Amino acid sequence: MVLNIIKFLSVVLLILLTAHYFLFFSWIRFFNIHAFQTKLGLFLIMFFLSITFILSSIFIHIYNNSFTRAYYLFSGIWIGLMSFLLAMTVMVWIIKGGLWFLPHDIPTQTIIQSLSCFLYGLAIVYTGFCHYQFYKIKVTSINVPIQNLPRQWEGKKIIQLSDLHLGGTKDLKFLKKLVSLTNDQNADLIVITGDLFDGSTNSQKRYIADLNNFKAKQGVIFTSGNHEIYSGVEKARKLIETSKITLLDNNAIVINGLQILGISYPELKNTSSFDFEDPKKFTKNLPTILLYHTPTSIKANDENLSEVRSSDYLAPNTTFSYAINHGISLQLSGHTHAGQFFPFTWVADKIFKGFHYGLHRIDNFYINISSGTGSWGPPLRSHYLSEIVAITLVKS
């Protein structure tokens, strides 16, 4: 596990160093920077910025306080801005190449400098807009038909929350607002589909009191996501168990004839595949709602967990065949954040083959993918806002 994290961070660091050097290289040419001291200063600034997101992520995982949260917020905004600056820089290089064919008496360098300032200004404005959007929370209302829905559940409301990521850029102020907005929905059941926490579990204890203020007639259910691994699986589970929230990892409960099945993220240590044939864990022929963090097919008994884990990121299985074959009525997932902001919204759409956001139907099977109630990484969102999903169950 530690080795995998080191490998992942090494790849991320290499990408960030390359991206920042590309910006440094481009700017000294676009703006004719020749002075050694200026170039050295710019190089050192870009080097610091290239490592700042990884450093802030490590710091906030170990020490969650006002300083580390502010540093994490700054580094996240910079990473978002940097991605926009990269896109604009590529555009400038393309235009610069086209200007080479113009007559030599045209001041191409002045054009490039003016164009660069304009495009970089747009990048800064767009970053500001996305950061403004980051603080918004919308309520998304959907109706989901369920075959053989018990009469007690007809017209009832389930609230789906996902990817709160408490401890990073989302803290107590956000949680208090979320609790108020959620309770206003007067839900019959609240489910949280993974990634409740970020950072160290020692600092996450302060969220329990507010998490206990969620109100629903049938309570609150939580299923683990991949970020519970980074916090420490067992520590995160023990922390949840100190709250009023019901932890549902690789187990099912039946509430008034409706089965709620929670399957933990496949990377959880020592987690075996869920056995649908075990009558103590799963009741066949009941309408079932599956809580599974990623919008992918749940793993079969004969699948290798490491392969499932890799495929969730590189080539996710979005056939949902295993859930469909076992009579799952509705799968509730998150994980993708809908990409948060362009162009990553487009990337998420392509990677997950359209199953990166929203309600989808395959015959009698439905899946809803939340854009996330919180956010991770760059504190930016464009058109996919953080959301509370209000699901009204109707009989099919």
Image (spheres, grey):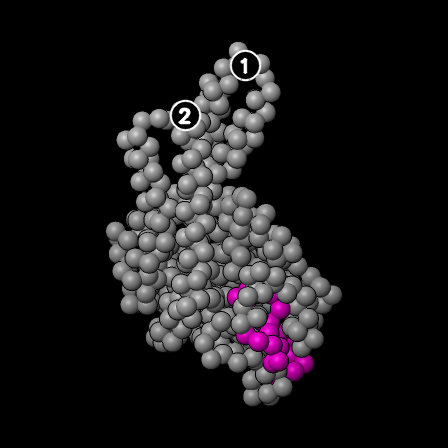
Q: Which residues are magenta?
A: 283-305
Q: Element type at marker 2? A: loop
Q: Check disc 1 and report its element: helix, strand or loop.
A: loop
Q: Residues within 10 Å of mark 1 (few under 14, many from 20)?
A: few
Q: Mark 1: which amino acid?
A: His
Q: Residue at x 47, y 67 (%)?
A: 225
* Magenta residue check for 298: yes
Q: CA distance from mark 1 to mark 2?
A: 18 Å
The first of marks 1 and 2 along the sequence is 2
As drawn, the residue found furthest toward the top would be 105
Dot 2, crowdedness within 10 Å: few (<14), some or many (≥20)? some
Tell me the quarter of the picture where residue 391 sits.
bottom right
Residue 181 visible from this viewpoint: no
Residue located 44% across and 45% down the image: 18
Quadrant containing the C terminus in the rendered view? bottom right
Query: Residues at badges 1 and 2 in contact (C-beta under 8 Å)?
Result: no
Q: Where 249 sits versus 227, above or below?
A: below
* Location of residue 166 in the rendering, given as x and y in whole percent from the top left corner: 38, 59
Which residue occupies the foreground of this view, 344 or 188?
Answer: 344
Quadrant where the N terminus is found in the figure: bottom left
In the depicted structure, whether residue 69 falls above or below residue 263: above
- Image: 326 above or below 353: below
Task: Look at label 2 and name its amino acid.
Answer: Phe
Residue 31: assigned label: 2
Indicate the quadrant where residue 62 lies. bottom left
Residue 167 is at least partly visible in this image: yes
Closer mark to the observer between disc 1 and disc 2: 1
Q: From the viewer's side, name the closer residue of 332 and 396.
A: 332
Q: Between residue 74 and residue 151, name the one nearer to us.
A: 74
What residue did someone put label 1 on? 104
Predominant SS of the magenta segment: loop
